[in-house]
Image (cartoon, grey):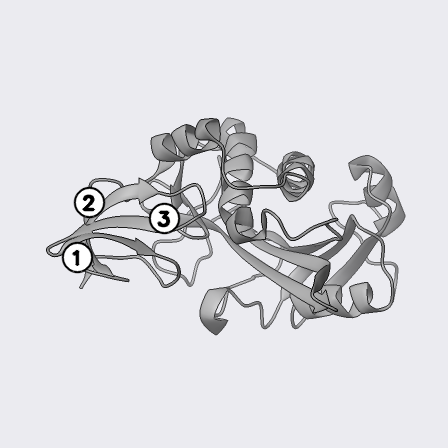
Amino acid sequence: MGEVQFEGLSAAALAGRLALPEVELHDRVASTMDLAHDAAGRGAPAGTLVLANTQDAGRGRGGKRWSSPPGGGLWMTLVERPATHRGLDVLSLRIGLRIADALDALAVHRIGLKWPNDLLERDGKLAGILVEARWRDQRVEWVAVGLGVNVVPAPEVEDSAGLAPGVTRLQALARIVPALRAACATEGPLTVAELEQFSKRDIAIGRTIAQPVAGVVRGIAATGELMVETASGPVACHSGSLVFAEDR
């Protein structure tokens, strides 16, 4: 077998193109997230990217499966080693915001955000984010940021979205990597500017939801909670999946 390539580039060439210390490039894997944790445990430096052409057992939040057909998108996990844990609670939201900004130019329509970790193109799912941290002696040792992006819609998945026709995986990756790294390097809660930017992309604000609680979405908090106006008053949801009432 020859050397695995991504859009005609070797792992070393891709690392140089993306200004990363290391790229682990695979043709077919079960999960880039698992491989990234293994690499981090062996001492892989911050900025190590694990990328696959096909992923058989990619996972999202709550163990949900992410469809990863060959050549159809970006199936990847980035290893970072933050100095502190400040910002981890909002990292998936901050990543979503940064990636949406980065990919708008490659999409047909403005990219929307759905709390806590999805990017949408109109009503179709464009990308999903999964953040997993590993700790040692009460400090974060590394963070693995898993990302699945449909460059073209996944044919077997209903309501799947993609980027604009003709966009290549390399074009998308070149915009995503610096956005990911910038988000991971930012500490603290969401800023006023970030909250305003998120609100403009928030597909749920003002809509009635059934989960994680029944009520009307009022936005998100600086610390990442979903703010919902319920029949008994405002509620801050720390976790769960957002389900719209009309989808029940």
> Within 10 angstroms of label 3, few (less than 14), some, or many (20 or more) residues?
some
Seen in the image, is 236 located left or right of residue 239?
left
- The secondary structure type at the circle numbered 3 is strand
Which of the marked residues, 1 or 3, is nearer the chain's N terminus?
Answer: 3
Which of the marked residues, 3 or 2, is nearer the chain's N terminus?
Answer: 3
Please state which amino acid type lies under the numbered disc 1: Ala
Residue at image x 81%, y 65%? Answer: 39
Quadrant for the C terminus, please: bottom left
Viewer-closest of 164 and 236: 236
- Residue 37, disc: none
State the image quarter where residue 58 is shown. bottom right
Single out the mark in the foreground, 3 or 2.
2
Report x, y in % for residue 102. Answer: 57, 32
Q: Is residue 117 above or below residue 63?
A: above
Q: Name the residue under label 1.
A: 245
Which of the marked residues, 1 or 2, is nearer the chain's N terminus?
Answer: 2
Seen in the image, is 127 located left or right of residue 2?
left
Q: How far apart, in angstroms, are the residues tagged by discs 1 and 3? A: 17 Å
Report x, y in % for residue 71. Answer: 62, 54
Q: Name the residue under label 3.
A: 124
- The secondary structure type at the circle numbered 2 is loop
